Each structure stands twice: as structure tokens, then as C-alpha cells.
Image: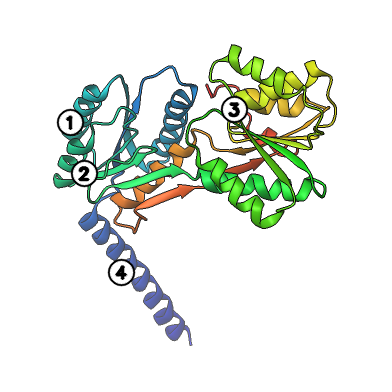
Amino acid sequence: MRFGRWLVCAALLLLTLLSACAHLDLEAATGPAVPEKLGILLPDTSDPWDQGAAYHAEKTCSELQEAGELEYRLSVVSGANAMIEAAQEMVSWGAQGIVVYPKWGGFEDAAQTLLKEGVDVITLCVPVGASGSRHVELDRREAGRQCAGRLAERIPEKGFVLLLQNGKPDDLCSGLEESLADLRPEIHLEVCTLGGDPETAGADFAQLFRMNQPIDGIVAVDDSMALGALEALKQAGRSDVQLILSGGGTQKYLQKMQSESSVQLEAARQGPDLIDDAIQNALSQIRGEKVEEIKRVPARWVDPQNCAMFLDEDCPW
């Protein structure tokens, strides 16, 4: 009996030793995991959204680097030529993929060259049309649909809503109009194009809110228009508007959302943390995983109940 127990123990010990040796042999053959090398190219502008993209890229990549998942280089440059030169430097460094926001255009040939050299290219917001590149952008049309859904929930029968735009093409407006016509065709949507500069827009607001027509809600394509409308409403002494929706979601707007008591402020937020989706897509592509050719990222709905989740005093946007 003792001899049998000894044989069982010896067999278990032998199996343990063999397993450990096999593990060491495998580790020696494959080596330790090597983090992917990723380059990030972003425009150097005074636009807070662009600055916010650089902020989120640095924050996300540094966290991934600390976790051993990647090595990265982030370049914020001025002009198309500087962006092309920075891309070449990243290739020399050994970048396996590059996330680029080619705001000034002119990156098409450079992107094609990178792809031919085996470097994955993920564009942000502005596509380059290079065969094999991948693209990440905001889904403004879906943001408009989300606004329509919120209006359908909150606006009374035969309500009156203002859509404030700045004259520039924006899919948010078309998404809102199409979806609201399906959900609540009895709601009247009045489209108003306001001046681009603050002085002109202020005069437009003053004239707009002198109308006798009761206003149930307002949708603005961005936060500056939403906040301008809020201020103009107060100056006009109007208390009929109960809901203002914005297609932005800046820190300034979120802070006002928390403190405002006279009007409910909400947003279909589409912020510069979009860069996080591009970074994840780039890592997936480098690792050989399937990545969709165009990824349209929907808005995240923000209201006074959840806006604290999106507040970040360090973010420039």
C-alpha cells in the first residue's frame, strides 16, 4: 500500500516537472510579449476639440503603455507637410500603425505609401481614400436621431421646436428632421439659421425670441448656440422653453447643465475622446483582428443625472 502511494506521488511530481519544462521551452521559443508600436498624428490648432483629441490620446496611450500593451509616439504638428514628415519619422522609429487626423488634407499619397510599407493607417474625422486604410468618425446623423427621440418623449402634442444651425452642412439636422417626421409628425420644427459670429448671432437670438409663438424646445447644433439661446431666453424673460438639446457636450456646457434650474439642458455628446476608438481600432488592426473599414461612433446621451461622468476639468474641450 505504501509502495503504491509512493508511485502515485512520484508520477505527480514527474508530471509537474514536465509541465514546467514545457512552459519554459515555449517561453524561450516565443519570447516575452512585445508591445505594439503606435504613432499618433494630430493637428496643432486653437480649436478646443483638436486640443481635446491630443489630451485624450496622451491619456489613453500612457495608460496602455503602463499596462505593457503598446509603445507610442504622439506628434501634434502644424500643416500638412509637417504631418507627412512626422509620419516618416514614426516609420523610422518602427511604428506598426499610425492614427492620423489629416485636418488640412494632402495626406492621401503619404497614407498610400505607409500602407505599401506595411504600416496600418487609421484616419480620424477626415478620410484619405487610400485603399486599405481604416476610418473613424462621429455619427452626426445618429446624434440627430437621438435628439428626435428625446423630443418625442418630452414635447407635448402639436408642440413647437426650434432647430438652430449656423448654415454649415451638418448631418445632425437631417437626422433630426427625418426621424422626428417619423416619430412625431405633428411637432412643428422651425429651422433657424443664425449668424456665425457672436454679435450677429446675439442679434438673431433677440429677434427670434420676440415671437409670440410659444416654444416648447430648442435643438442647437453646438454648445455655443445652445448657451446663447439660454442667455437670450433669460434676457427676453421667457419661461415657456423647458428643454434645450445640444449636439456638442463641452465641459462648459456640462457645468451649466449641472447648475441650470430654469431649463433642462441635455446633449448628444460627440467629444474628442473619439480618438480612443481610433486607437483601439489601430491596435486591433496591428494584431491582425478584423476591423470595419468605416466606424461611425454614435453620440453618448448626457443629461443632469449622468453628466458628472463626463466632467474633466483638465480637458480643453
Q: Please tell me how many numbered marks the rendered image carries.
A: 4
Amino acid marked by disc 3: Thr
Residue 317: quarter of image: top right
Q: In this view, does 251 lie to the left or right of 42?
A: right
Kindly indicate whether the residue at mark 3 contacts the one at mark 2 (C-beta within 8 angstroms). Answer: no
Q: Which residue lies furthest to the top in this view?
A: 199
Q: Residue furthest bottom?
A: 1
From the image, tell me which residue sits under label 4: 18
Residue 98: quarter of image: top left
Q: Is residue 251 visible?
A: no
The spot of residue 159 in percent (x, y) is: 79, 44
Kindly indicate whether the residue at mark 3 contacts the one at mark 1 (C-beta within 8 angstroms). Answer: no
- Under tag 4, what secondary structure? helix
Mark 2 vs mark 1, CA separation in Å = 11 Å
Mark 3 vs mark 4, CA separation in Å = 59 Å
From the image, tell me which residue sits under label 3: 250
From the image, tell me which residue sits under label 1: 88
Depth check, front residue: 106 or 59: 106
Q: Earlier in the sequence, mark 2 or mark 1?
A: 1
Crowding around mark 1 (Cα neighbors within 10 Å: few <14, some 14 to 19, many 20+) is some
Q: Which residue is drawn at 15% across and 40% down?
A: 113
Q: Residue at x 55, y 41 (%)?
A: 172
The spot of residue 309 in percent (x, y) is: 65, 36
Q: Can residue 224 be seen in this view?
A: yes
Amino acid marked by disc 1: Gln
In front of the other: label 1 or label 3? 3
The spot of residue 15 in percent (x, y) is: 35, 73
